[in-house]
């Protein structure tokens, strides 16, 4: 039967609204400023096979990789001999099983529309197995400001993942609606801020509950078969739209490379290389099933994994590819798993884009993901120059400050990513002081920061003139200066300090970022993009983030493709 375009649009928005409402529930009930103020979380809805059918407008680095966590949860439960059952919630953060980095904790819950009996926990026959398969899954992922490890904030310059915090394989944190208190105690005894962590986990559970309830409501209204059929149609529709777009890109092979400054241990630059091939109309085998992808993204030639904590796992690389190709389509295209069906991603194991354990990976999620996007966009600029912007800041400028709060005598852990300049676009300038690409978070308002932590904001302003010059100028970065009101451990995990974000089509590069510590005697220590230092009460950390690259020059006259 031909699909009804009106019904497809209705269900696209229904599923999307569920993911958005999940995010609202998480934000409103969270404890930490990092989630309720910065909105460092993501929520999504999945079909019975674990394929994403709707995402909220949350964090791209979370959303593209979250399906790997859902599949890890599903497969783990199958290894136990049963599906996830009503009232169960699986928790995990293992980067090598679908996660991103340890602070990002994911919760996965099954959704049963027709409730089954829990007495069928063990199933022998395939028919019994089918009776207990969830109709949907919902997932929530949030960045927790501390998950233990060697450094407050769990984002330090580590050499292996065991130093970065507690690593959680897929485990049932909730069974039959009952919290597993012993498992929760194990987690909370390995973090610096247990009350905040428990509150944020509770908010994630509430988000999953909200999503499950809304899915049951729409199934009650429209019928389960109709709702699930719409999910299948959305997956196919997304695949068709992506395929149609990819066939319009000029056939050929496009290559680019870019570098991370260093891993924080060795000062050697780290190369990320990408080759993007467009094959045009896909070849098909028997029937109409494609036998090869329309586009292939190959990261062969990228440097091997490194000793420092900027290694990316495969889920991160896949997520960055999902983001870039999604950006090439119009906003009304459903953000489902179908988008990646015409695209093949090759990320050689043991490299900076697909590290093996026990590699440290905290910065792979936040820094390497940004550089992967930069490389892909640079390659695509050769194929479709009228659609690709210059490089944005290219770093999340991860700042963590931790110590003992003198007001309570309890540990505190502050975490924030600091915005930068957006790259100029082919038709307009870049935006100043904004989070770009793989991050979609907000800032922590000065009032909320000073209320929650023993910190004082001295300056928070745009970094005038840091955007690259060109026909269209890149956006400016940000200046953020914070005083510690108690002795504290400060860690910065940032990049684009050795070279600024690239310009395109004659545009100039944006200004590189800087970091310095202002001591009590007024002396200044200028520091690299990745460091850990002990600050005394009254000392300040000042960060200036990169500006975006410029696009074109005053004499540029770039013809649009097809003219």
Image: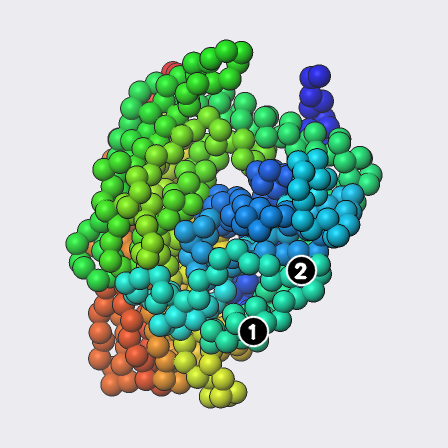
Secondary structure at numbered mark 2:
strand
The residue at 41%/38% (across/down) is 321
Residue 234 screen position, x and y as percent: 62, 30
Q: Is residue 353 left or right of residue 234?
A: left
Marks 1 and 2, Cα distance to the nearest angstrom? Answer: 16 Å
Q: Residue 95 carries which label?
A: none
The residue positioned farthest toward the top in the image shown: 286
The residue nearer to you, when weighing 500 against 333, is 333
The residue at 46%/69% (across/down) is 146
Residue 499 screen position, x and y as percent: 22, 51
Residue 215 screen position, x and y as percent: 73, 44
The residue at 23%/76% (across/down) is 524
Residue tagged 1: 185
Residue 148 screen position, x and y as percent: 43, 71
Residue tagged 2: 175
The residue at 78%/47% (across/down) is 115
The residue nearer to you, when weighing 255 against 227, is 227
């Amino acid at each position: 039967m031909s699909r009804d375009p009106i019904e497809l649009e209705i269900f696209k928005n229904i599923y999307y609204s569920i993911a958005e409402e999940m995010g609202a529930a998480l934000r409103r009930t969270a404890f930490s400023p990092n989630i309720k103020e910065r909105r460092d979380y993501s929520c999504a809805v999945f079909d019975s096979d674990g394929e994403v059918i709707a995402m909220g407008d949350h964090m791209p680095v979370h959303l593209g990789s979250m399906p790997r966590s859902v599949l890890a949860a599903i497969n783990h439960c199958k290894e136990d001999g049963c599906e996830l059952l009503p009232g169960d919630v699986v928790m995990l953060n293992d980067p090598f099983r679908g996660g991103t980095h340890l602070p990002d904790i994911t919760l996965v819950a099954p959704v049963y529309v027709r409730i089954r009996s829990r007495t069928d926990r063990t199933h022998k026959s395939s028919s019994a197995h089918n009776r207990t398969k969830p109709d949907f899954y919902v997932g929530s992922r949030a960045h927790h400001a501390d998950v233990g490890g060697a450094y407050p904030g769990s984002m330090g310059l580590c050499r292996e993942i065991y130093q970065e915090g507690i690593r959680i394989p897929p485990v049932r944190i909730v069974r039959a609606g009952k919290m597993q208190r012993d498992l929760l105690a194990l987690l909370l005894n390995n973090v610096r801020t247990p009350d905040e962590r428990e509150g944020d986990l509770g908010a994630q559970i509430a988000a999953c509950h909200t999503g499950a309830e809304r899915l049951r409501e729409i199934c009650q209204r429209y019928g389960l078969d109709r709702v699930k059929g719409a999910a299948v149609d959305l997956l196919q529709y997304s695949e068709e739209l992506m395929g149609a777009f990819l066939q319009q890109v000029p056939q050929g092979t496009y290559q680019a490379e870019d570098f991370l400054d260093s891993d924080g241990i060795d000062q050697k630059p780290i190369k990320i290389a990408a080759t993007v091939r467009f094959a045009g109309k896909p070849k098909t085998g028997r029937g109409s099933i494609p036998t090869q992808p329309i586009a292939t993204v190959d990261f062969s030639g990228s440097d091997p994994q490194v000793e420092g904590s900027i290694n990316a796992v495969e889920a991160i690389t896949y997520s960055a590819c999902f983001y870039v190709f999604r950006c090439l389509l119009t906003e009304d295209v459903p953000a489902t798993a179908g988008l990646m069906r015409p695209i093949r991603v090759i990320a050689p194991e043991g490299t900076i884009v697909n590290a093996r354990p026990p590699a440290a990976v905290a910065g792979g999620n936040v820094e390497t993901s940004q550089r992967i996007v930069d490389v892909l966009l640079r390659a695509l600029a050769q194929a479709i120059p009228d659609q690709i912007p210059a490089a944005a800041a290219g770093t999340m400028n991860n700042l963590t400050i931790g110590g003992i709060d003198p007001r309570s005598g309890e540990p505190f852990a502050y975490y924030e990513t600091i915005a930068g300049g957006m790259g100029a676009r082919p038709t307009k300038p870049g935006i100043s002081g904004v989070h770009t690409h793989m991050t979609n978070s907000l800032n922590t308002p000065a009032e909320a920061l000073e209320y929650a932590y023993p910190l004082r904001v001295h300056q928070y302003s745009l970094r005038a003139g840091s955007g690259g010059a060109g026909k269209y100028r890149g956006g400016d970065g940000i200046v953020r200066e914070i005083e510690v009101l108690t002795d504290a451990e400060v860690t910065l995990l940032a990049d684009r300090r050795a070279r600024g974000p690239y310009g395109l089509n004659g545009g100039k590069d944006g200004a590189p970022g800087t970091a310095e510590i202002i001591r009590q005697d007024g002396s200044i220590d200028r520091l690299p993009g990745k460091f850990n230092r002990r600050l005394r009460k009254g000392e300040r950390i000042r960060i200036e983030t990169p500006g975006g690259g410029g696009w074109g020059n005053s004499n540029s006259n770039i013809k649009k493709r097809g003219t």
